Amino acid sequence: MSIRAVKSIVQSQPTLEGAGVKLRRAFGFGKTDDFDPFLLLDDFRNEHPEDYLPGFPWHPHRGIETITYVLSGSVQHGDSLGNRGTMTAGDVQWMTAGRGILHQEMPKGDARGRMHGFQLWANLPRALKMTDPRYQDIHSQDIPEVVDDDGTRVRVVAGAFWGKTGPVEGVAADPRYLDVSIPPGVRKRIPVEASRHAFAYVFAGGGSFRDASAPRGVRTDRVSAGGRDAGSESPVETGNRSLVLFDSGDEITVQAGDAGIRFLLVSGRPLEEPVAWQGPIVMNTPEELQRAYAELRAGTFIQR
């Protein structure tokens, strides 16, 4: 087994989306190669209703899949195909936009006004860009959780892990999407298929990722790894809202800090296709992108 080097660490950055929702963006709208097949990860954690209640009114998507995972509060959603529903704490919605859909997502806090969740975008390969739109709405109780002897808990949203398989299926990126909680002081080795790109997003507690095979000068953009570059054999410290991008290898090693650590661990097989991207529409060529926006202006975007 070879431990994956930490390629870079970044801190998620404040941004505005929708009708004025304040959230944090871990990655997106930049270089896509390192995260392929994933395009964007947003952390919409907030305790101030005025910062999230404006929501995400009607907007289009084409050529991608959006994965929404709610931890606190709820999200009401609807679309141009007539689908309606509400996601609550622990629920997941995996939407395949395919050839095109218009939808809206309107967040609402819990009894204490807290709203927390994530939205991940996964690219669709050229052959499936214009596939039929579809939803997979997953309730919290249908997401398997596995618990190891050392107290490590893993919710398996998609893919297989420790003998459990997540309920999300038939997704083009063939992803593994895990919600991992490791108790204070526990050191854990987690396998990740060598053929996949992988990243972790820390959203509670902190700890370190062993960087045994890291090259010199590992990038630490906008946030430092313990205040220094990570050299060979050095632990790379992470904290709340840190995004850790891994290099090649077939496992990661995590050392939980005094408060434990909780993070998303996401991996997927790269598509290695060209990306033409503007806003919520992602195609392969600029011509396809221009055509999509022309159809949106002409009212022919939704193709039944």
Image (cartoon, rainbow, N blue to C red):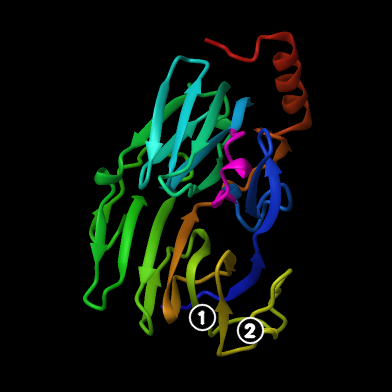
Q: Secondary structure at mark 1?
A: strand
Q: Is residue 169 above or below residue 46?
A: above
Q: Is residue 19 left or right of residue 157?
A: right
Q: Residue at x 64, y 70 (%)?
A: 9
Residue identifier under label 1: 208
- Residue 143 spot, x, y in % from top left: 29, 48
Q: Secondary structure at mark 2?
A: loop
Count of labels shown?
2
Instruction: Say what amino acid the circle numbered 1 marks.
Output: Ser
Q: Residue at x 37, y 80 (%)?
A: 184
The residue positioned farthest toward the front in the image shown:
112
Examine the structure image and report whether residue 304 is included in the region drawn in magenta: no
Camera-side residue of 56 and 225: 56
Residue identifier under label 2: 226
Examine the structure image and report whether residue 53 is included in the region drawn in magenta: yes
Q: Residue at x 66, y 9 (%)?
A: 300
What's the magenta region?
Answer: 42-55
